[in-house]
Amino acid sequence: MIVKTYCARMDHGGCGLLVHFEGGKITRIEGDPDSPLSHGYLCPKGLAQLERINHPDRLQYPMKRLGNRGEGRWTRISWEEALDTISEKVRETIARDGQKAIVLGQGTPKGLELFLMLRLANLLHIPNVSTPGHICHMPRETASNLTCGFFPVPDFDHPPASIVVWGSNLFQTNEEGLIGIQLRRALDRGS
Ligand code: SF4
């Protein structure tokens, strides 16, 4: 079985994927030539996904620390125990110090996780949510809105005569849906 999906775990990306399954397991990942963004391209990070998914060191279940922080001793616990432990600590902290004593923080959000975290903060009336977006994406979006009136996305696929890349290392970072290969293709086509 082959499932069409997209890569968004290593950057904001969006490269189209063809994921091959056999017996419920992923056996191969390749670029989707029909993807309007990536046209079959996958960068080394995308190609390494199968290795990452099956890596023996990949964390796949909750672990609880034994002993003191830094000792490096852990034991596997059930999801029920993990969730009960976390909710008990959150309840205790709110009862003792109030909602402002808790900060929900996340690395660069991909997919829908951020919205789940925001919903949780909203339900618990926790006012503190932090992501790198507050110093990265949001100033960019605000500046774009103030300058252009909207958040423009470059159209590399109808290659522009000239491209200004300012404060961005697109070939390395594939920032936010702008895959470096799109810029490469535009340059190859004469931009
Ligand atoms: S450029 Fe980004 S979205 Fe595309 S394969 Fe690489 S990591 Fe995935």
Image (cartoon, rainbow, N blue to C red):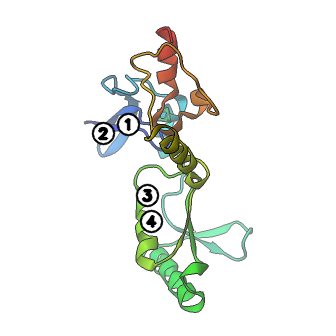
Query: Which residue occupies the foreground of this view, 132 or 83?
Result: 132
In the rendered image, residue 24, in percent from the top left (x then y), is placed at 30, 46
In the rendered image, residue 145, in percent from the top left (x then y), is placed at 48, 44
For the residues marked 4 and 1, what is the alpha-carbon distance in whole angstroms?
A: 35 Å
**Mark 2, residue position:** 22
Asked if marks 2 and 1 touch (Cβ < 8 Å), the reply is yes
For the residues marked 2 and 4, what is the alpha-carbon distance in whole angstroms?
A: 36 Å
Q: Earlier in the sequence, mark 4 or mark 3?
A: 3
For the residues marked 1 and 3, what is the alpha-carbon distance in whole angstroms?
A: 26 Å
**Mark 3, residue position:** 113
Q: Earlier in the sequence, mark 4 or mark 1?
A: 1
Query: Residue 72 is drawn in which quadrant?
Result: bottom right
Q: Residue at x 51, y 44 (%)?
A: 146
Q: Residue at x 58, y 23 (%)?
A: 164
- Amino acid at the residue labelled 2: Glu
Depth check, mark 2 against mark 3: the one in front is: 3
Is any atom of residue 79 visible in this view? Answer: no
Quarter containing the N terminus: top left
For the residues marked 4 and 3, what is the alpha-carbon distance in whole angstroms?
A: 9 Å
Vertically, is 110 above or below 81? above
What SS does tag 2 mark? Answer: strand
Q: Which disc, if any, is residue 118?
A: 4
Mark 1 nearby-residue class (10 Å; few <14, some 14–19, many ≥20): few
Vertically, is 96 above or below 28? below
**Mark 1, residue position:** 27
